[in-house]
Every structure is written in C-alpha cells, then in structure tokens.
Amino acid sequence: MKRSVLVALAVVVAVVGALIVLWPRGVEAQAHLAESAQLRFVLTPASTKSGVNSFDLRITDRAGNPAQGDEVVVEPAMPQMGHAIAPITAGPLEPGHYRVGDVGLFMAGQWEITVSLSAERVVIPLLLT
Amino acid sequence: MKRSVAVLLLALGAVLGIAAPAQADGAQSGADLHVAQTLGDRDLTVIIRRVAEVPGPVHVDVVTHAGSPPGEITLTARAAGAASSTAKVVLGAGPGFYSGVVQVDRPGPWELAVDEATIPFVVPALVSSPWENTTYGGFIAAGLFLFAALLLAALGRPRLALVPTAGLVAGVAVAVTAALLSPSIPPVAAPGTQLDPTFDNVNDPYQRTSAVDFSRPPVNLVPTMKDDDLVLSLTDGSSGRPVDDLLVHDSAFMHLVVVSPSGQLRHLHPIRTAPGEYRARLRASEQGTHAIAAEIARRGGGVQLLRSSIDVSGSAARPDDGKADLKTEIREAGRPSTITAGFGRRDLQPWLGMLGHMIVVGPVSGSPVTAPIWAHVHAMIPPAPGMPDKPDESVAAYGPDVPFTYSFPLPGKYLVWIQVERDYSVVTVPTVVEVPAGKGVSEK
C-alpha cells in the first residue's frame, strides 16, 4: 500500500514537472518604455500576436506631468522585410493618454514602432508571435 | 510459457510500432522556386517545383504573360555541365501555365536551362539530422532493452533482468534529452543560400563549417548593348572574377529597372547566359541615355543596388499607360507618405510574390540618371495561416486597393511608377509626386 502511494506521488511529481517545463509560453503584453530628450513614452500593446492590434500610450515629460499635444503619430515598420505600413494618427483620451486602435500588424516578427509627438520621436521595438 | 511468449510478442509489436513511423518524416525540405525571366521577347515565370524524390522527376511550370508569342522552348537539366534529360514545352498563344518534366538522378547543385537561360538550383538530399538519429536510436535501444528484460524475466531470471532495465532507462533518457534540446540547436549553414553548393555539402549538410560571416564583396556592373539586348557583366569588387552566386530574391536573380530619358519604365528580369553575364531584351526602346538599376542578392546575404546608365539607339517610345485611382497622402521629407492605388476589381494576381511594386526615382532635375534616390517599395500579400508556400500567379484574388508607405528622404519632384499584375499582364501606372521640405523634425 505504502509503495503504491509512493509510486503515485512520483508519477504526480513527474507529470507536474513535465507540464512546468513543456507548457507553451506566449510573450506577455508588457509596457515598453522609451525616452526622448524631453518626453517619456510608455507603449502597451493590446496583444503580442500578429493581426489587428491597438496601443495604449502614456506620454509624460521628465517630471511626470502629462505631455501636451493634440495628436500622436505611430509609424509601424518591419525592418527585416523592408516594409512599412501607413502611419496612424490618434488624439488624446485625456492629457498624456492616447489610444491608437486598428493597427494592422499582419506579420509575426520583430516590428519597430516609431512614435512621435510634435517634434519628439522614439523608436520602440515590438516582437509579435 | 505460452503466456510469456504472448507478452514478448506484444512487447515486440510495441517496439516496432514506435520505430516504424520514425522514417516517415524528415523528408520535407526545399520549396518551389519561382524565377521571373525576360527570355527574348517573352516575359516568363519559371517555377521549379519541390523535388519529392531522387532520382526522380522535377516538375517545371512555365508561366507566360499577355502578348507572349507562342512557340516551343527546351528545358534541360544539367549536373556539373552534363545534360541528363531534356523536355520540350509548347507555349500556346494564350497566357497561362505550361508544364514540362525533367529528371534528376542525384542530389546536389543542378542547372535548368530554358533555351539560352540557365537557372542554378539545388536538389536537396534527404538527410536526417544527428539529433533525430539520436532520438530514434535511443527509443529503438530502449525497446530492445525492454524486450531483453522481458525475455530474462520470462525465463525466470528477474535479477539479471535489472541490467537491460537500466539500459532501457538510459536509452529513454538519451532520446528524450535529444528531442527536447534539438529545437535550440542552431541550424547549419545551408548550401545554396549561404555556402556554395557542392555535391559533397548537399549530401552531408550537417558538416559544420568554421565560417561565421557569410557576406561577400560588392559587385561591379558594366552594361553594354548587343543588338536589342542589354548585356550586363557582373564582377566581384574584390577579385574581379565573374559573380556567379546570385540568389533568387523576390522571385528573380536580378530586378532590372530601366528608365528612359522621357521617363518610361521597364522592370525586367535578365536571364543568366554565362557565369557573371546576364541579358535582357529592350524592345522598342527610345533614343538616348537610359538610367538603369539592378537589385541583386549574393549568396551569404544582403541585397545590393547597382546603378548605371546606357546609351540606346532606338526610335519608338512606348508610353506607360496603366490607369488607377490614386489616393496620396504626401508628408514632408523624412516622414512616411502613403500612396494607395485602387484598381477597381478584386482580381489582381501576385507578381514576383508581391501584391504590387512601386518604383521611386528622384528628386529629378534633369535626367533620371543623376537622381540621388532610387527605391523599390512593395505592397505585400497578406499571409494566409497554414499556407507556408506563397500563392502563385494563378490566384487572381487580391486587391483592389494596393497600399504603399514610403518615407521620401529628400524634398523635390519624384517619378513614381506602380506595377501590379492583372490577367497575366503587368499594369504600369506612372505618376509624379512633389515632396515638401521637412519642418526640422529632430532625428531621434
């Protein structure tokens, strides 16, 4: 009896271990930070899969105050393919907070998202799976 | 005793059942090769289909385009200069696919001659990787040890059976380790794209080489006219030897764009007629100095643009007469501008693997020969999930809008041509774009 309990325990440990090792991991959608001379850009993609995406953008100055600006321009490009898609312009939801919707990132791979607000621009790398 | 024999038979069946399907995979390698060829008066796309078995047949599709004269072409497969088989393909008057079959008898570097054009290609060998062999070997050894252990147990020697049981555990451990680690092993340098293909390295692709940087020197381009043919000589920028290692990129060895003095565009795909020599026919050309630019990719990586000019004595000028509904949003120099061409119906075909091509030459003040910027922008076919091979020209289901995004680097007047394929005919839409100067955007 004791032996069978031990065997069952060993099997459970082995299965849990295998699941932990082999469980498929996606890339989590996390915030990407980039800074220009005066501003701090935080871009959070809605998804890290290829397809139609949307970005949540928070732009502040170095002191943490919301940046002023009527429109933010997002220019997605895929350098490895030598390909850029049309830039997207978005207005603020509230000062310093922008939402850029309907971004058609059709291909998996490493993208480069150029974000500009008035004369400040940053380039944010984004990996899609 | 009867029972133990039954157990042994079951075990043997299990071992063979595991081992048998192992041979079935590992056979997938290579893909269809699409090569656009400006062969005499015809614009052809030659598709060399994936080679399934060696020795065996190679299926070749020749795609003709609208206005291509009917006739017969000869396909010849050659290895190391020796012809192994030929096939005649009769091209009809209508555009479309015409097929021929040639035979290959061994893996390695081959050459397909289409009349005077030669297309080098690699017939891959079906070689299983060392880690596949380790995985399968480990499982087979484990099965044999299991069988031995059962045999000893059935013969009443349970203590002795512990020895093959240990072997079983070791075999499974080796196989599982190899299977789990194999995805992280870097791929070996591929003969044909990174290494010069030889019969040796194609048949033994897992031999590691010491090379880590595969890039090669730049290329010098010398154009000359021979009758109606533009002959391009390519030589290595470091050794002066002929350059004979061009890769097929975007479905051609060379994308040659010729702009006439009056601004008419041709997008040709010269055929390889000898090592380092490519030629394309300039039909009904215009008198004067033509600007030419050739896009090539050498083995080992990287695409280069070679610009030059050529004096052509001709008379006729064939105007580019394609029509499209153009929507342009031109931003200042350095910022992305978008140009969307609407073609009305959803029946565009992929040309050179792309939905559309946009050639940009400028800013022009006099001749296009001296324009500082020369660009080739693509509109891509949206990728279809589960379809690794790109669609060929028989799929007329794209469009009608063809979008391009390009950041014009300098302000000024640019000549722009948009090219798509419809009804097996390339449509060229000319336009002119004025790009305003930048407003002092910080470069960061």
Image: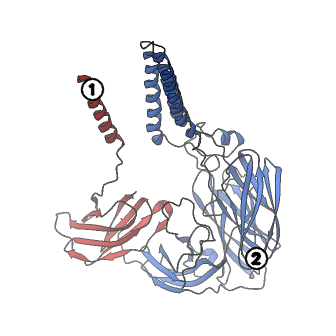
Chain colours: A red, B blue
Q: Residues within 10 Å of mark 2 (few under 14, many from 20)?
A: some
Q: How crowded is mark 1: few (under 14 residues within 10 Å), some or many (20 or more)?
A: few
Q: Disc 2 to disc 1, how far (Cα)? A: 79 Å
Q: Is residue B134 visible?
A: no
Per the image, label 2 sits on a secondary structure element best described as loop
Per the image, label 1 sits on a secondary structure element best described as helix
Q: Can residue B67 be seen in this view?
A: yes
Q: In this view, does B281 lie to the left or right of A90?
A: right
Q: Is residue A71 left or right of residue B196?
A: left
Q: Which residue is drawn at 35% across and 59% down?
A: A48
Residue B395 or B324: which is nearer the viewer? Answer: B395
Q: Mark 1 points at which residue?
A: A4
Residue B267 or A120: which is nearer the viewer? Answer: B267
Q: What residue type is labelled 2?
A: Ser
Q: Choose mark 2 or mark 1, whichever is in front.
A: 1
Residue A92: percent from left, percent from top: 23, 76
Residue B170: percent from left, percent from top: 44, 24
Residue B399: percent from left, percent from top: 53, 78
